[in-house]
Image: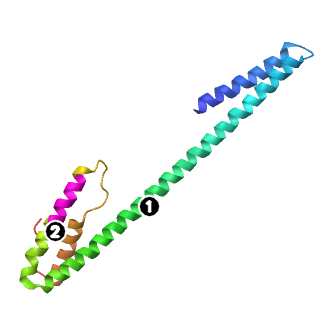
Amino acid sequence: MIENVKAALVATKELHSKLGKLASPPSEEIKLLKALAATANRAIMEVHKQSLVASHEAAIRENLLRDVLQNELFDREAHAARISEAQREAMERLGPAGIPAYQRANAMVSKVEESIAALSPHKQFAGGTRILAENNWEEKSKEGTSNELPNS
């Protein structure tokens, strides 16, 4: 686009200068054509400036939306981790019967996430609740609160 703008500006400047050389005392028609060439030149510059501003604003909006999306993904993963932790604690309170239920719940979460991923045409940036749950379970098992890991 910059090449087109430069070409248009050069053309209007050249037109303006050639119109000035046509007659030694310029006629009213030549003065009008020179004024139109100058107006076209200013209009081209103004449109170019507006397009640059619009381009910068679009880039800013895109970056803002990217940041908002990233924050939403962080919030989603944090919420998933809180839910997983609450679920794990509830299942531990049930004793040995709670561990298979926790494993089944994690398997269902995995299936739901896989189904959503298969439906979505967009890349998913989030790590997934199953991964968070497994990491959380592994941390708790290292602490000695549980010695079994969920099935993957």
Q: Residue at x 22, y 51 (%)?
A: 118
x and y percent of residue 63 in the render?
48, 54
Q: Residues within 10 Å of mark 2 (few under 14, many from 20)?
A: many
Q: Report the number of numbered marks.
A: 2
Q: Residue at x 66, y 41 (%)?
A: 49
Is residue 148 visible in the rendered structure shown here?
no
The residue most toward the right is 25
Q: Is residue 47 left or right of residue 118?
A: right
Residue 137 seen in the figure: yes
Query: Quick one: SS at disc 1?
Result: helix
N-terminal of the pair, mark 1 or mark 2, is 1
Instruction: Give the camera-side residue of 60 and 118.
Output: 118
Report the residue marked by disc 2: 106
User: Which stretch is magenta?
Assistant: 108-117
* Residue 19 appears left or right of 146: right
Q: Name the image quarter holding residue 31.
A: top right
Quadrant of image for the C terminus: bottom left
Q: Does 111 appear in magenta?
A: yes
Mark 1 belongs to which amino acid?
Val
Q: Could you say which disc has been placed on residue 68 in the image?
A: 1
**Residue at horizontal 14%, vertical 83%?**
92
Disc 2 residue type (three-letter): Asn
For this orientation, the residue located farthest to the top is 23
Where's the N terminus, which quadrant?
top right
Q: Position of residue 89 (x, y in %)?
A: 19, 82
Query: Residue 137, relative to residue 16: is it above or below?
Result: below
Q: Is residue 47 left or right of residue 37?
A: left
Helix, strand or loop at mark 2: helix
**Looking at the picture, how far across and down is residue 100, in whole percent?**
8, 74
Which quadrant would residue 138 be assigned to in this image? bottom left
